[in-house]
Amino acid sequence: MSVEQQPHGTPNAPAIGPETGHAHGELAHAGPDHGHHELPFWKKYIFSVDHKVIGIQYAVTALLFLFFGFTLMMMMRWQLAYPGRPMPFFGRFFSDNVMPGGVMAPEFYNQLGAMHGTIMVFLGVVPLAVGGFGNFVMPLQIGAPDMAFPRLNLLSYWVFVPGGIIMLASFAMPGGAAQSGWTSYPPLSVIASSGQTAWLFGMIFLITSSLLGSINFIVTIVQMRAKGMTFFRLPFFVHAQLVTSFLLLLAFPPLEAAGILQLMDRLAGTSFFLPTGLVVSGEALKVAGGGSPLLWQHLFWFLAHPEVYVLILPAIGIVAEVIANNTRKPLWGYRLLVYSIIFLGFMSFVVWAHHMFMTGMGTTMSTFFQTTTMIISVPSVIVVTCFLMSLYGGNIRFTVPMLFATAFLPMFAIGGLTGLPLGLTASDIYLHDTFYVIGHFHYVVAPGTLFALFAGIYYWYPKATGRMMNSTLGKIHFWWSFVSINFVFMPMFFQGMAGLSRRLYDPTVYAHGRGVQPLNVVISWAAWSLGLAQIPFIINFFMSLKNGARIAENPWNATTLEWMAPSPPGHGNFLTEPIVYREPYEYSVPGAKQDFSPQFVAEA
Amino acid sequence: MSETVIPYMVKPNPVTGIPNGKFAIWLFLASEVMLFGALFSSYVLLRTGAPHWPPEGGLSSEILNVPLATINTMVLITSSITMVLSWASCKLGDLRKFRMWMASTIALSFVFLVIKYFEYHHKFELGHYPSHDNFYAIYFTLTGLHGIHIIGGIIVNTFLLTIGTRMWKTDPEHFTNRVENAGLYWHFVDLVWIFLFPALYLL
Amino acid sequence: MDETKYGWWLPVDVSVHGARIDQLISVVHWFMLLLFVGWGAFFVYCLIKFRARDGHQATYNPVKGIFTKYIEVAVVVIEVFVLFGLSTPVWFAYKNHPPAEKDAVTIKLVAEQFAWNFHYSGKDGKFGRTDSSLMSGDNPLGLDPDSPEGKDDIVTVNQMHIPVHKPVIIQITSKDVIHSFNIPVLRVKQDTIPGQRIPIWFEATQTGHFELACAQLCGLGHYRMRADVFIDSPEDYAKWEADNTPPPAEAPAAEAPPAPEAPAVPAPEAK
C-alpha cells in the first residue's frame, strides 16, 4: 500500500461539482504521480500491470469489437431487408467469393451471423463488462491498490487479444470464418470449413483469458478489501463481479472440454459428436461413429446459460451504482439484491437444457428444466422490483448515466418477461428458434446490458480521465439510440409470433416470412439509424479527453471508495489508506451535512 | 518497477487464513475439476450410449496395458510424496534437501511420460489412432490432456528448482508458499490419474 | 398458397393440440403485459414524482415493501399456475400419448442438407428396409430394392401429404446434420438428430396447402430448406396415395445398385 501522507483535499470537504472543480482537480491529478513516471511508454500503456490501464485497454478493445460486430449485423440487415439485391456502395469492397455482384452469398451471411454472435458475446460485452469495468472499478471500490496478481492480469489481457485476432483473421481463411452459428452445433460444425477450427482455437484463448481473470477477481475481492470493508459494505457492483467471476470460473471449463473434443473431431478424426452412419452430400462420412451430437449441446449450454448471467450481472451492478447515486437515496433492498444474484448464480447452472427442449428430451427432464427456469425468474423479478422501489422517494437527477440506467429497467423487463413463454416447454414448441428468441435475448443484452455499459462509461469516464463527458452529446446519443433500438427489436417479437425462423438468409422463401417482411425493412433502417446514433458517442468519447470539464475526485457526489481516489488515480490508487466506515449507499442521511455520506469519511 | 505492495502475497489474510497465491491455486483447481468433470461426464455419456464398450469388442483391460499403467500409478504417487518432502524441506529450511526431492519429483514425472510414450507408441504401431473408435478417442484425449498437465507441472517444478530458487535468499517464506502451491497442483494432477486409471484401463 | 393466412401474429392453427399452445401463449402474454404495465406505471410515476427539483429531497428510510412482497408472491403463484396448470399438461399430452399405430398414418422422415425425404409405407402398411450405406442421389433414403415390404412404398422429396382428421405419426431423423422439423400452422417442432429416430404426432383439423420450414441452422441452404405440406381430405389423400404408389415393375429403387450382403452399418430403426 502506498501510504503517502500528502496534503490533498480532505475527503470530508464537500465534493466539488463538475463546474467548479478545476483547481482541485489539478491538485489531485498531480498528487499520485510517483513510482511510474520513469516507466517507458510500452510498459506504461501497452504491457502495463496497472489494473486501471488494463481495464481501459479491455474497454477500448471491447468497444472496437462491439462496433465491428455491430457492423457485421448492419451488413446482414441489408440482405434481410432487401433479399438478393446488390448492396449499394459497400458491396463493391467485397470479393466475388462472398458478395458476387454485390449480393451477399448465403455462406457469407452465415459467417456474419456466427461471428456477430461470437464477437458480441465473447469479444465485446464480456470483455467490456468484466475485463473493462471489473478491472478498472472493482479494485478501487474495495480500496485495493491493485489486483491481487497484476502480472496475471496483464497476461489475461494479452491472451484475450490473440483470441480476438484469431477470430478476425478467420475471415481470411479458405472457406471463410466459422459459419455454424455462435453455438457451433455439430455435426454441422464438424463438417464445416477450416474457419471453425480457427473459431475453436480462438475460443480456447478467450476461455483461458477469462479463467485467469476470474481467479484474479475472486482473490482480489476476497483478500484485498480495505479496512472496514465487510461483505455487506461492498458496493453492489462488486458483488455482481464476484458472482460473475464464479460463473466464469466454473462454467467455462466445460466449454473448453467441449472445444477440445470438437477440435479432436475436426483434426484427429474422432467421433465424439458424430453418430454412426452419417451420409453427407450423398457420401458416407468416413468416421468411426458412435458419438452424440447432443453431448455438445449439453456441454455448450452448461457454459452458455451461466454466460447469459455473465452478460447481465455486471450490467445490473452498474445500474445499481448509477441508480443509488442519482436517486440520492440508499438502494432499496440491498441485501435482498445480493442474495438474489447469488441465488441467480447458483440456479444458472441447472437451467441449461431449456435451450434444448426441441431435441426430443423426455418429459421428466423437460419438467425439471422448465421448473428451474421458472425458479430462476423469481430473483430476476426481485432485482427489477428492488430497482423500481429504489426510485420511490428519491430525488432523481437525470444525468446521462442515469438516463441509460433508467432505460435499462423497462428494457431488461421486456427481455426478462419474454423469456417466460420460451422457458415453458409447451409455448416453446411454437416459439423455439424463431425471431421471438432473437428479440428476447437482444432485449436483455442490447438495450439491457449495453445500455447499462454505456451508463457505466458515462459514469466512470471522469474517474478514468479526470474529465467529464459532454452531457448534450450524451443525451443525443441516449435518445437516438433508445428510439432506434426499440424499433430494431420490438418488431422481432411479431416476426417470431408469425413463425419466422432465425438464421434465414432469405426470409421471403416462406409465406409466413413474406407476411412480416415489411417489418424487416423497418428493423434494418432502425439498425442503421442505431449505427449513426453512435457517432455522437464516439465524438464525445474522444473530444472529452481534451475538452471535457476537469473534475475533482468526486464529481457525482458519490459514496463509494473509487471516488476517494484522485481522478485519474495514479499507480497504487489511493493517496491515503482507505478505511471504510459505513454501508455503500448512504445518501440523504437525516442530520448529515450534505446529501451523501461517503464510505471513506469518518464523520458525516 | 512497481512500488505497489499487494497485501497478503506471503502472509495469510486473517479472515480467510490463506495467502493470495494459495487461494488462487484452489480456485484454479476448482476450474480444473470442472474441466475434467465435463470430460468424464462425456465419457460416461458416450460409453452408456454405446452398444458395447470398447466398441471393437473385448475388455478395456485387454486393450490397454494395465501393468504399465499400474507402474505409472506408482510412479505418480511416489512423485506426490517426493513433492511433499520437497515442501517439508523448505519448511525446515533445508534447501539442499529441497533440491534433492524436487529433482526426484521431476525425474519421476519424466519416467511417467516415458512409460506413457511407450504405451502410445504401441497403440500407434497397431494402427490404433484416436480416430479408430470412441474408446481410443476418449483414451487419447483424456490421457493426452493429463499428459499436458504433467508437462505443465514439470515446467513449474523445473522453474522452482532452478531460477525460482533465487527467491530463497530474499524471501524464503514466499518461496515455500510457491512450492506448496506447485505441490497442490501436482497432487491434483496425480489425483486425476488415480481417477483415469481405473476408469479407462480397468472398468 | 393462401398468403392471407399469415399476418403479424400467430398464424392460423390447423391442429388438434395447437389450441392449448395458443391459449398458453396468450395467457402468458396477458400476464406479461399486466406485469409490464403495472411496473411501467409505477416507474413513470416515480420518475415524475421524484425528479430532482428545488426544495425536493430524497427520503433516507426505505419504504415498506409489503406491496412488493404481494407482487412477488403473485408472480410466483401465476408462474406456478402457468407451469403446472397450462404448460406441463400440454407438453405431457404432446409427448406422452402417441396415437395407436393402427389408427394413424405413420411417415418416416429423413432430413438432409437441404431437403426433406418422406417415406410412406404404402398400401401394405409396412416400411421397406432402409440402410444408410445404400443412400445415394437417386435413393436418398437408402431403400433396399430387394425388400418385399418396400415395393409399394412411396418416397417424396419436399412434399408431405397427410390426411385431415386422422392422427399422423412422423418418425424423424436426419442423415447428416441437425435440422428442425417445423410446421408453424400445425404447432409442431422437433429437431432432427442424426443417429436418433424421434417420433412426433399430431392431427390436422383443416385441409389446405402449408409449409414446412427448417428451424435449425443446417448450412448455407438452411433458408431454402422448405417443403410443401398438403393436408388432404380423406378422398384426396387416398387418390394421392393411389396415384403415387409405384407400379410393381418400377419400384422406386429398382435401378439402384444391388445391395451388399451384409451392411456395415445398421440402419437406425424405430425404437
Image (spheres, rainbow, N blue to C red):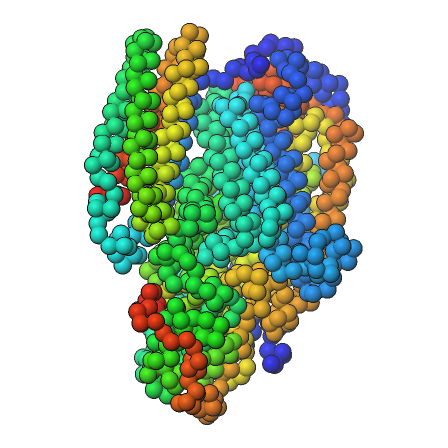
The x, y position of residue B177, in whole percent, is 38, 17
| Closer to the camera in the image, A90 or A563 | A90
Against C249, is B24 above or below? above
The x, y position of residue B139, in whole percent, is 32, 44
Please say whether residue A585 is visible from this viewpoint: no
Please say whether residue A466 is visible from this viewpoint: yes
Q: What residue is shown at x 33% (from left), y 26% (from top)?
A: B110
Residue found at the far front of this picture: B125
Label total for image: 0
Tell me the quarter of the picture where residue C131 sits. bottom left
The x, y position of residue C59, in whole percent, is 59, 36
Q: Is residue C253 left or right of residue A235?
A: left
The x, y position of residue A92, in whole percent, is 76, 54
Tell me the quarter of the picture where residue B107 sits. top left
Quadrant that contains the C terminus of chain C: bottom left
Against C125, is A456 above or below? above
Quadrant that contains the N terminus of chain C: bottom right
Q: Is residue C74 left or right of residue A363?
A: right
Tell me the quarter of the picture where residue A139 sits. top right
Q: Is residue B89 left or right of residue A491?
A: left
| Closer to the camera in the image, A297 or A572 | A297
Q: What residue is shown at x 53% (from left), y 41% (from top)?
A: A202
| Closer to the camera in the image, C59 or A460 | A460
Q: What residue is shown at x 33% (from left), y 22% (from top)?
A: B106
Q: What residue is shown at x 62% (from left), y 67% (from top)?
A: A507
Against A285, is A515 above or below? below
Against A68, is A91 above or below? below
| Closer to the camera in the image, B203 or B121 | B121
